[in-house]
Every structure is written in C-alpha cells, then in structure tokens.
Amino acid sequence: MEYLTRWRMLLAADKLSNSSDPISTVALSLGYESESAFSTAFKREMGCSPRQYARGRGEPRLLETNSPQEVKNGSSVARMPTSQKRDMGHPVLG
C-alpha cells in the first residue's frame, strides 16, 4: 500500500509541475475525494504541501540512488537518480 501511495504522489508532483490544474482537480484525478485528504497525504509523502510544490518552494523527499529501477520495483520509498530528477522539470530539482 505504501508503494501505491508513493506512486500516486509522484504522479501528483508531475501534474503539479507540468500543468495549471488546480490542486482539487489533481486530487480528484488521483482518486482522492477531498483536497484536504490529498494535501495531507502529499505533505506526508513529499515533505511539503502541494501548493508549495507547485510554486517551486517545496523540497520533496526523493532519496538519491543509482538505480532508476527502484522507482518501478515496489520498494516502499521511491528513489530516483539525480539525472532523472533533473529531467522531471521541477524548479527545485533543477
């Protein structure tokens, strides 16, 4: 279950970075019935609120590793190599 939550938050982070959709729309698109529940889960997993992340002020918690496969393999914490983080297009990540 932790993997699914983390995966949903990574999808949310991508939508927040690459679209102008309001947070409530992102929340609904990922299966959350309320913006409040989504915001709480996002902050718990990513270390900042969705609004901070969308504005580029958040510091998401992504651990460094050399294996991009860890994002796909079902580990409870998603890890991305630095080069992949830069490619995500988030202002905080480069």
Image (spheres, rainbow, N blue to C red):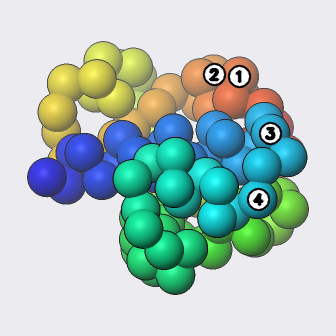
Label 2 CA crowd tier, 10 Å (few <14, some 14–19, many 20+): few
Q: Position of residue 90 (x, y in %)?
A: 77, 41
49 over 12 or under it: above or below: below
Badge number at residue 77: none
Residue assigned mark 4: 22
Question: Disc 3 or disc 2, which is closer to the eye?
Answer: 3
The alpha-carbon separation of the residues under discs 4 and 2 comes to 28 Å
Residue assigned mark 2: 83
* Front one among 53 and 68: 53
The alpha-carbon separation of the residues under discs 3 and 2 comes to 22 Å
Say what amino acid the circle numbered 4 marks.
Answer: Pro
Question: Disc 4 or disc 2, which is closer to the eye?
Answer: 4
Residue assigned mark 3: 19
User: Can residue 29 be seen at all in this image of the molecule?
Assistant: yes
Q: Position of residue 33 (x, y in %)?
A: 42, 68
35 over 65 or under it: above or below: below
Residue 91 falls in image quadrant:
top right
Mark 4–mark 3 CB contact (< 8 Å): no
Mark 1–mark 2 CB contact (< 8 Å): yes
Name the side, left or right, on which 23 lies relative to 8. Answer: right
User: Can residue 63 be seen at all in this image of the molecule?
Assistant: no
Question: Disc 1 or disc 4, which is closer to the eye?
Answer: 4
Mark 3–mark 2 CB contact (< 8 Å): no
Say what amino acid the circle numbered 1 marks.
Answer: Asp
Say what amino acid the circle numbered 3 marks.
Answer: Ser
The alpha-carbon separation of the residues under discs 1 and 4 comes to 23 Å
Label 3 CA crowd tier, 10 Å (few <14, some 14–19, many 20+): few
Which residue is located at x 80 percent, y 39 percent?
19
* Front one among 38 and 65: 38
Which residue is located at x 36 percent, y 41 percent?
7
